[in-house]
Structure formats: C-alpha cells, structure tokens
Amino acid sequence: MIHETHRARPRANEATRGQAAPTDLSAAIGSSTPRHDAPIAIDPTYGFRRLDPVPTSAELDAFYATKYMELVEAGGRAPEIRRMLEGGRAREEELAWIGATLHADVEQALRAPGDARGRLLDVGCGTGDFVEHAAKAGWRARGLEPSRLASERARSRGLDVAEGTLAQALEAHERSGEPAYDAITMLNVLEHVPDPIAHVRQCRALLAPGGALAIVVPNDFTVLQEAARAAIGTETRWWIAAPDHINYFDFTSLDRLLEGEGFVVHERTCNFPMELYLLLGEDYVGQPDLGARCHARRRRMEATIPAETRRALYRSFAAAGLGRNCVVIARRTR
C-alpha cells in the first residue's frame, strides 16, 4: 500500500443512510475497530466513492504504525493477510489457492499477443508473492513496496523488490533511461491510496505503448451488497472500512477512470461474490468466525471446477457487475 499526496477533495457529498455523519475520521484512526459509518463523497470526474475527508498521509502513517496489525490479528481487516501471518500449512494452502486462481488469471491476461512476456512491475507487492509467481511464469518481474519490513522480506527470498513509492519509482525510472515496462500490476492497492488518479497516471508513464495494467480492487456499493443488507436486516455498510479503505470502486467507475486516463479496457473478471453467502443465510457480518468457513468453502469450489469453467463463470459475473473484487486488465493507448 502506497500513501502519497491527495488531489482536490470531491465536491459531491453522499452521506451514509440512516447514520450520523461525523466531520472527521480521528476516532477511526485512533481505534482498533473499523468504522463503517464514515461519510462518503463521489469523485466528480470518474464517479468512484471515497472517504470525505480523505485522511492525511500523517494520519495514515500513524494508523498503520499503531493500529492496523491489531485489526488484522483480530480479524477486523485483511483476512488473507492474517492467514498468511499464521504461517505453516495455513499459509501454504492460501498461497497455493491464490497462485492457481487470481495470480494465474492475472498473469495470463497480461501477456501480449503471441504469449510474449517482458518487463513487469508489481506495485505494492508486499513480500513479493505475485513477483515470484510472474518470474516463474517467464516475466522479468520486479516489485515496488513502500514498507521497509515487507520489501526486506521480499529481497531475502531472492526477489527483485525496491523500497519506495510509485512517484519515487517514476522519478528514478526517468533518470535511469531504462526501457518502459510491458506490464504493471496493482493488486488491492488503489482502495488504500489518497490519490488513485495520480497512481493510474504514473503507471501509464511507466508503461510502453500497448503495455498492460492489471488492477484488482474491492467491488463496493453494489446491488448485491444492498440486497444482502436487506436480507440480514442491517443498516451497516460493512464494506466501508475507514480509515484505510479510502476509495470505493465498482466496474463502471474503474472503467471510467482507466479510459479517462489513456487506457482501453480489454478484460473484466472478478472473484467469488461473497455476498451470496449472506443471501443464503450465512451471516458472516454478524458472525465473523463464520467468514473463515465461508472462505474455505469458496476455496474448495474454485479448486474443484476446471480453471476455464471458473474463468468463464467469473467473466459472466463481472459482466453483470458482480464479484467481491473487480479484476480489470487494460492496455495503454498509443
């Protein structure tokens, strides 16, 4: 996750329904409990939603330094990170599943015509799991990660990972005279950054003409989420997670952002729409321990059906605007 300066605040406000709208996020930043009632604004250009106001870089740095890992360990954030932190068999099973599904799908979609694989940059790469996957698939893969601890861990695995922000990487690249990248990935990054528009622009500047950009973000404020809220009888918008989830995209707003910033969208897919469990009576929002069991069932399903069947199913879900995460592949225009 990369934290840089935010651009102008949006002008159009959208208060959360049925809840008071506090004027700041100080309570969320100092809390170990995610805040689901934070005020939301709509970007006037591309239509994605975001926290209003956007937390400052200093506030976010303080949150990640003092509270984020408490939330992860308590199950209030990023369950996939918590499973990785458990190590041992849980980590190995999670890595095998992600490698065979999301990582495999993204890597194949990034390939140029003729199955070509060139220079790839994974932005916000963490400890380098996708960098390793791409390198094994034949890419000249490099990672970029702002966390010193995570980037050091990645390099200890023998991976080419630099510590820094995307803005710093672009500046260094322009000085270096190195060739442009053939592919860039941002897997669950844009929801966390104060300025997602700047990130997309910086990726475009780093890409060769025709180069591919893969973005994965949560698919939020969807029809399915609203139906699930009604099904379980709650006014809570559990997908709002202040202060670290700043931006909220769906397929439409993500397409608008990419196409408005010099890309053509080539593929839309998703992963399993977890809200279906809520509609089937499995209330993992009210019973967090149930979430792990739902995830295990979803993982078994994805491991059982043929990969091409799963991909076709998830492309059809994406066409209907469904899926827990939007997975979009776009190519830079000339």
Image (spheres, grey):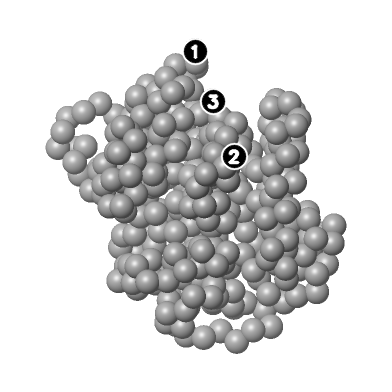
Q: CA distance from mark 1 to mark 2?
A: 32 Å
Amino acid type indicated by mark 1: Gly
Q: Is any part of residue 313 visible from this angle?
A: yes
**Other-residue count near label 3 (Cα within 10 Å), few / some / many at <14 / 14–19 / ≥20:** few
41 relative to 311 in the view: left or right: left
Q: Earlier in the sequence, mark 1 or mark 2?
A: 2
148 or 91, which is in the foreground? 91
Above-or-below relation of 275 to 313: below
Secondary structure at numbered mark 1:
loop
Tell me how many marks there are: 3
6 or 290, which is in the foreground? 290
Instruction: Name the outermost residue toward the left.
Output: 175
Secondary structure at numbered mark 3:
helix
Residue 120's x, y, as percent?
37, 30
Q: CA distance from mark 3 to mark 1?
A: 12 Å
Which of discs 3 and 2 lies nearer the camera? The answer is 2
> Quadrant of the image for the C terminus?
top left
Above-or-below relation of 213 to 278: above
Q: Which residue is mark 1?
A: 114
Above-or-below relation of 177 to 40: above
Q: Which residue is mark 2?
A: 93
Residue at 42% across / 79% down in the picture?
A: 30
Residue 68's x, y, as percent?
44, 66
Secondary structure at numbered mark 2:
helix
208 relative to 32 in the view: left or right: left
Q: Earlier in the sequence, mark 3 or mark 2?
A: 2
Residue at 53% across / 56% down in the picture?
A: 82
Q: Which residue is mark 3?
A: 108
Above-or-below relation of 128 to 80: above
Amino acid type indicated by mark 2: Glu
Amino acid type indicated by mark 3: Gln
Q: Is any part of residue 184 visible from this angle?
A: no
